[in-house]
Image (cartoon, helix red, strand yellow):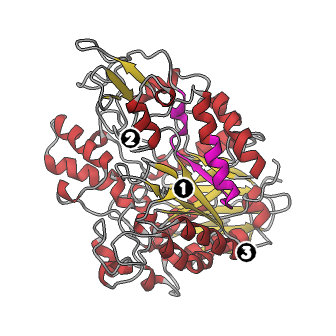
Amino acid sequence: MKKQWWHDKVAYQIYPKSFCDSNGDGIGDLQGIISKLDYLKELGVDIIWLSPIYVSPLADQGYDIADYYDIDPRFGTLDDMDELIAEAKKREMYIVMDLVVNHCSDEHVWFQKACEDPDGPYGKFFYIETVKEGEKLPCNWRSYFGGPVWEKLPGHNDKYYLHVFHKKQPDLNWENPELREEVYKMINWWLDRGLAGFRIDAIINIKKALPFKDYPADREDGLSGMQNMLHDAVGVGDFLGELRDRTFLPHDAFTVGEVFNEKPEELPDFIGENGYFSTMFDFAETVFGASQKGWHRSLDITPDDYRNCVFSTQKKVEGVGFISNIIENHDEPRGVSRYIPDGDQCYESKTLLATMYFMVKGLPWIYQGQEIGMENRKVRSIDEVDDIASLNAYKVSVADGVSEQDALDAISKFGRDNARTPMQWDDSENAGFTTGTPWLCVNENYTWLNLKAQRGRSGSVYEYYRKLTSLRKNPEYKQTIVYGQLEPTLEEMHNVMAYYRRGEDQTLLVMGNYQKEPQTLPLPGKVKKVLLDNCEDLQIRDTDRSIRLKGYQAVVLELENDPGE
C-alpha cells in the first residue's frame, strides 16, 4: 500500500449547528469552532470534517444547498471560514467540508431558472419529466424520506422533477456534462482556497438506472425502496473517475465517501491504489438489522454481531485500501446507546467500545461528544422531534399499526436527533453550548455527563480517548497500528472481541470482554507490555497463559514473541 499523508491521522466530525455557539443565538457557528481548536488538538485530532455550512433553507439541516460558494449567515461568513482554515493550519490540522452534489436546494438559482424554463439549459441540470393529467408517474421509487420521488415542478401542472431525498432537494442530472463542469469548478474553488478535502455525501445516488421504470412494491404505499434502483444502476464509476481526475488528484485532496450499496467487485475502484476516494466509511454495523418496513421492525445488534460486522469489513478491505471506522455520525444514534446492551452504559463499556473500533486497521473517526460518551436522549413527544427522517419513521410505524409510544421508542433508539443534541461542554445552563435558547433540546444528562467533569480526571471516557489517540501517534507503535495486518482471534467465544495487529517485528493483541460478567481468555504467548487497560487492574496468569478480564474490560497488549511463529 502506498503511504499517504492522512494514513496516521485521527479524524473528528463536527456538526456545526450543535457544537459551540459564540454569539448566543442558539446555533453553533464557525467562531465557536475556532474557539475549540486547541481543545481538539489536545484530544489528538488532525482532520476536522464539518457537516454543511453553506447557504441553505435547512430543510434537511444544510444538506439542501442554495449557494455552494457562500457560508450561511447562521454559521458566519467566508472570512470566518478562511480564518478557520488558517487557524487549523497553524496547529497542523486539516479542514474538510461536506460535498453534497447528488442534489441541491430548490432555492438554488439553478433550480429557479429550471422552473422558469424547463426546456432551457438549466432544465437539463435536473431530471424533469412531462406527466399529463391522468398519466402515471415515471417510476414508483420511494424517496429516502418517504413518499414518491416525483414532485410537481413549481409553475407547471404537467411537469415533475425527481428528488430521491426531500422534495426541497431536487436531484442534479450528472448525465449532463455542463452540470458536471459547474460542480468541478465549485470543488476546485474550495480546494484552491485551502480546504484539505471533502466528505462526499450520498454519492452513489448520482447514477440512476435509466430509463425510469417501476420495481416491485415493498410497502402498502405501492412504492419501492431506492435500493432496487441502485442495484440496477451501472456506470457510476465513469462519473466518479472524472470527478477524481478533475478535482481531487491535482490538489492531493483527502476524500472520504459515504458509499452504500457498492458492489463487492467495485471496492478497489472506490478505495484502491487509484480509487475514486481516499477512503470510505464502514457502514456494516450501522445498517445491521435494518428493515425496509421501518425502524420499529429493526433488529438490535448484539456484541457478537458487532464483532462479526467489523471483522467482515476488515477482511473485505485487506490488501485493497484504507477504510474509515466509526461508531456514530450525524445520521446515526449514539454509538454507546446502540452497540452496548441497554442498561450497560458505563465508563468500562464505553471505553471498551472505543478500544475495539479505534484499534482496528483504518482511519479512526470521532464524532463530537463521542469522546465523552454522550448517549441517546429519550423522546417523550413527537413535538420534540426535528429530524425529517425521524418524523417519516414515526408515520411509517403508526401506519403499520404500532402504538404511538412504541413509535416514539423507535425514534429514541434510532433517530438522528440523538447525535444532533448540543455538545455537552459543562454543567452550566444549556451544557455550556449557548447563552441563548438552543435550537434543539439539550440531553438532560448534561449535568453529570459533560467535558468539564471528565477533563483531567483519570478514569474518564475523555481521558481514555486521549490515551487512544496518543497510542496511535506513538512512534514506537505507530507503524504497527496504522499499517499492521489485522487478524481476528477467539471468534468462537461468546461476547469476546479480540484481534492481533501484526507489524514487521511487533505484535499487538487487542482483547475485550464484551459483557458485564468476567471471563477468562487464553493468551497465545507472554505479555511484554500492557499498552492500554481501561480497568487498570489486569490479571495475567503465566502458568496457564490466560488472562481474566472483568466486565467490559479492554486491553491492548504487546506480546513478547510473535504467536504466529
Foreground mark, 3 or 1, reads 1
Earlier along the polypeptide chain: callout 2 or callout 3? 2
At 24% from the left and 25% from the top, the residue drawn is: 221
Mark 3 neighbour class, 10 Å CA radius: few under 14, some 14 to 19, many 20 or more? few
Q: Position of residue 467 (x, y in %)?
A: 62, 76
Foreground mark, 2 or 1, reads 2
Outermost residue on the bottom side: it is 456
Q: Amino acid at mark 1?
A: Ile
Q: Secondary structure at mark 3?
A: strand
The magenta region covers 184-207
Foreground mark, 2 or 3, reads 2
Earlier along the polypeptide chain: callout 2 or callout 1? 2
Q: Is residue 449 above or below residue 510?
A: below
Q: Position of residue 308 (x, y in %)?
A: 54, 45
At 38% from the left and 16% from the top, the residue drawn is: 214
In reply to whether residue 194 is colored magenta, the answer given is yes
Q: Are marks 3 and 1 in contact (CB under 8 Å)?
A: no
- Disc 2 and disc 3: Cα gap in Å? 58 Å
* 441 relative position to 16: left or right: left
Q: Is residue 525 above or below residue 183?
A: below
Q: Position of residue 507 (x, y in %)?
A: 77, 61
Earlier along the polypeptide chain: callout 3 or callout 1? 1
Q: Are marks 2 and 1 in contact (CB under 8 Å)?
A: no
The residue carrying mark 3 is 529
The residue carrying mark 1 is 326
Q: Amino acid at mark 2?
A: Asp
Q: Are marks 2 and 3 in contact (CB under 8 Å)?
A: no
The residue carrying mark 2 is 106
* 553 relative position to 471: left or right: left
Q: Position of residue 332 (x, y in %)?
A: 41, 53
